Image (cartoon, grey):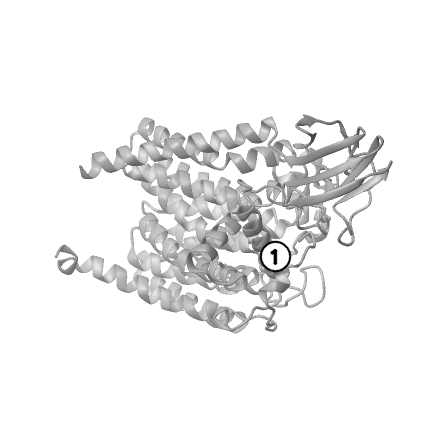
Amino acid sequence: MRIYNDFSSIKEWVFVVLLLLASLPVILPYFHSGYFPTHDGEWAVVRLADMIRSLREGQFPVRWSGFLNHGYGYPLFNFSYPFPYYLGAAINFIFRIGLVDTIKIIFFLTVPVSTVGMYFLAKSLWRNTGAGVISALFYIYLPYRIVDLYVRGSIGESLSLALFPWLGYLALKVVWEKDWLWPLLLGVSYAALILTHNIMTVLFTPFLLVLIVSQLVFSRKITLAPIFYRLLISIFLALGLAAFFWYPALTEKNFIALSQTPIANRSAYFSQPLDLVIPRWGYGMADTAGGFGYQIGWPHLVILGLVAIVSLGRKNKDRPIALVVVLSLVAACFLLFRPSEVIWQNTPFLKEINYPWTLLAPIGFLVSLLGGYLASGRYIRLLALALSLAAITFVLPHSQPASFVNRNDSLYITNDATTTSSDELMPLWVKRYPSNLAERKVEILSGQGQIEQVVSNSYRIEFTGTFPQVSRLKLNSIYFPGWKVLADGKELNISYTNDQGVIEFELPAGRHRIQAVLEDTPVRRLANTSSLVSVIFLGILSVHYVKKKYF
């Protein structure tokens, strides 16, 4: 009964519905049958197929792809963000839909989810409903969003764009409200960001901290101690929930090619100042003719200039926060240009990032958020709204793929490539990369024998063999720490110094039952345990919260 008497609530949800309708033109091509070529989008379908395959085989958490890399395997999900594919596996299982449609649904949902998140964040930060509308419109029609959807096809970055505003909104809730629901939700959401995209986590975290610190510094009616306590709970919860991924990824990176050879030359991907201003649309790589541009969007840049001017001249309680966001944007834009290379080379985590233009995602988020600051003045609000409509006119014609293709799911399921651009996840000891599927999973290198009943999946190989003399065998599976080979339950010494980096071992004469299995290392067990403890902790806190709140 209360909702019908609360006009502001009705009005708020009317705005939300209208914004959702405004977001539909951006994602209409996802209703088209089939799919469309992008840099990474179809590889996401292949990875989803492998995630589902590995889960069905009992591997959890999924780390090793035994099917990809032409059946030789490689540690795909030990280093590449897994959350989009766990989410995809859940959607695929619950709704029983195809792989392509599952990936399209995830991409599709990132737009309305981010729209609603930006509306509530801007409305809360600037305390103005119009601010929520203006910021949300700018965020929907962000040029880099279109690049992610229809050019790069980056499922991780697209999901990150959906998480950014919700993380900001939940951070404000943690600062301003004592309800313990918000620290729990912030912790879960930040864990989701860590698992969604490594690079976006590194790039967005400083700006999230700026938003939190600015609230603490420029707001007087708060008590710091309980806020810090709530924030610490969120941080530890997030790190614990995502520990199964980030801890092995950091500690075991020295085993893979990426630790020695970057996937790209960073110096080739810095922007020029005019790149941010001059419109350039294309479907190729950024460093090629006809590639996508580094533009922020001219309506967004005008908004940035207006906010800088207005915040310098207008004195109100939001002015300090607006100025801090403007300064953060200036710093972020500087990192797009070549003079900042020394910062990229010498800053932890940043030095692992090869493409400076990925900063366009958090930059676009901040510019869109700033648009809402202009909603408090009548005439400037109308100008900001007009610019948001200009952003729609500017971006909408490019919200479409280059072409459509119709491929059966079976083509993705049977694709056994590496899904990486430069084989950067290949273990260092592999000198000769696989180019096709091996004829046999198990081979005799020396000696004699008969191999029978070979059964294998993503992380286990079993067979029976009779050998009249000592023999040396090869498993056509690349070695990675954790692989063990047992003969009749007794562990054997294994070698992987061959050019292929595959598992070799010697067997004594006789009949043996051989089991090769990829087990968790102490590092992975510790990480898994940390995540399990965090899940239990989250469950206990959630039950306690519900009991205290409603019973």
For the residue pair 228 and 378, the one nearer the viewer reads as: 228
| Amino acid at dot 1 | Val
Q: Residue at x 65, y 36 (%)?
A: 517
Q: Is residue 234 left or right of residue 444?
A: left
- Against 117, residue 512 (above or below) is above
Q: Quadrant of residue 76?
A: top right
For the residue pair 285 and 488, the one nearer the viewer reads as: 488
Q: Is residue 328 visible?
A: yes
For the residue pair 98 and 403, the one nearer the viewer reads as: 98
Q: Residue at x 49, y 50 (%)?
A: 160
Measured as percent of width and height from the top left, residue 278 is found at 60, 65
Quadrant location of the C terminus in the rendered image: top left
Determine crowd level at label 1: few under 14, some 14-19, many 20+ residues with C-alpha closer than 10 A: many
Measured as percent of width and height from the top left, residue 195 is found at 51, 43
Measured as percent of width and height from the top left, residue 539 is found at 35, 35
Quadrant location of the N terminus in the rendered image: bottom left
Q: Is residue 236 visible?
A: no
Q: Report the number of numbered marks.
A: 1
Q: Is residue 409 left or right of residue 427?
A: left
Q: Tell me the element at label 1.
A: helix
Which residue has dot 1 on it?
46
Measured as percent of width and height from the top left, residue 2 is found at 13, 55
Q: Residue at x 56, y 59 (%)?
A: 148
For the residue pair 101 and 290, the one nearer the viewer reads as: 101
Q: Quadrant of residue 472?
A: top right
